[in-house]
Image (cartoon, grey):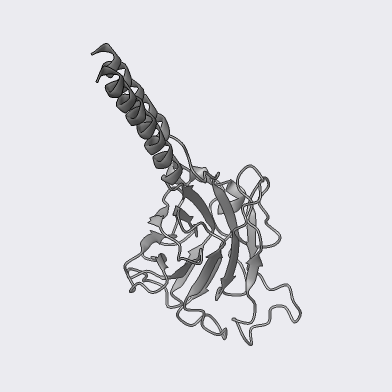
């Protein structure tokens, strides 16, 4: 009886340890979207949307540039092997975001929250429309899931100017993603949780105006900063647990043979 109790305790401890094993664990990644004159210090990745190629700005074709990071770093500075390309944003940043993020937005550096990539689905001077932007992530682990936390801020607006932005997975209908009103925002974030990459390790996200975007004829939308968290697959932990169970079963079988 005592031996069986000991084995049961050992099995419980083994299961707990196995489930705690982070298979493919990875530190968070932070990305600052905005102006090349406003980089964020520390281990941030940067997408610079302002047009730096003469003639500046070149408004004849807002889709001729695809901004690309070949190998994102995580918050420790380690390379992740994950790449990001961004396209469809207006060729110029907005630098009127908050410099004092609070609440849920406090995870982002103030330098990252002060500027934005943006687009507009309505007229904005004589500029071509930029009704949606596309983010493409590759090199993700298909066995893991990923949490995306978005922030955007455009301060100094009236209460009736609602610049809601939608973040959604490519292929899903409008108004089914995460929504965030950038107007005078200092603390709120939007999240897409538990996203699974394709078998090729890819996730594509669309950024466009939300359904409640109103009060401004240009229909602006924004993305200032992004955090990505990797949720490890539990396969290694499960395999460890099964191995321990197998060892215990063999021991039990041998003990039963000796008693016979």
Q: Where is residue 30 in the image (x, y as percent from the top left)?
A: 57, 51
Q: Which of 172 and 189 is in front in this view?
A: 172
Left or right: residue 259 compared with residue 227:
left
Query: Looking at the image, which residue is at 29% across and 15% down?
Result: 3
Q: Can you say whether 30 is above or below 11 in the image?
A: below
Q: In which quarter of the image is residue 8?
A: top left
- Pick out the residue farthest to the top: 2
Q: Position of residue 178 (x, y in %)?
A: 37, 61
Left or right: residue 104 compared with residue 26:
left
Q: Can you say whether 138 is above or below 29 in the image?
A: below
Query: Looking at the image, which residue is at 48% across and 55% down?
Result: 151
Is residue 159 at least partly visible in the picture?
Answer: no
Q: Quadrant of residue 242?
A: top left
Q: Can you say whether 181 is above or below 174 in the image?
A: above
- Pick out the residue farthest to the front: 260
Q: Position of residue 166 (x, y in %)?
A: 40, 66
Q: Quadrant of the C terminus?
A: top left
Q: Nearer the viewer, residue 120 or 69?
A: 69
Is residue 86 at least partly visible in the picture?
Answer: yes
Q: In which quarter of the image is the N terminus?
A: top left
Q: Where is residue 103 in the image (x, y as percent from the top left)?
A: 43, 42
Query: Looking at the image, which residue is at 53% across and 52% down?
Result: 98
């Amino acid at each position: 009886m005592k031996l069986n109790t000991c084995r049961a305790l050992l099995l419980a401890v083994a299961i707990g340890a196995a489930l705690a094993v982070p298979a493919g664990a990875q530190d968070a990644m932070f990305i600052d979207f905005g102006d090349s004159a406003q980089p964020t210090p520390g281990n941030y990745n940067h997408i610079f949307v302002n047009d730096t190629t003469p003639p500046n700005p070149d408004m004849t074709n807002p889709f001729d540039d695809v901004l690309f990071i070949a190998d994102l770093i995580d918050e420790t500075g380690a390379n992740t092997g994950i790449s990001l390309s961004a396209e469809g944003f207006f060729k110029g940043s907005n630098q009127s975001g908050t410099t004092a993020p609070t609440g849920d937005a406090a995870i982002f550096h103030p330098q990252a929250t002060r500027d934005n990539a943006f687009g507009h689905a309505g007229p904005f001077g004589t500029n071509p429309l930029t009704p949606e932007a596309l983010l493409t992530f590759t090199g993700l682990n298909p066995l893991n899931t990923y949490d995306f936390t978005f922030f955007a801020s455009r301060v100094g607006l009236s209460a009736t100017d609602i610049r809601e932005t939608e973040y959604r997975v490519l292929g899903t209908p409008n108004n089914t993603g995460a929504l965030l009103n950038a107007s005078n925002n200092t603390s709120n974030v939007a999240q897409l949780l538990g996203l699974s990459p394709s078998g090729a390790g890819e996730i594509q996200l669309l950024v466009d105006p939300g359904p409640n975007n109103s009060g401004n004829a240009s229909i602006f939308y924004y993305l200032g900063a992004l955090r990505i968290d990797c949720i490890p697959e539990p396969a290694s932990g499960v395999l460890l647990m099964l191995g321990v169970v197998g060892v215990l079963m063999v021991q039990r079988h041998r003990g039963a043979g000796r008693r016979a």
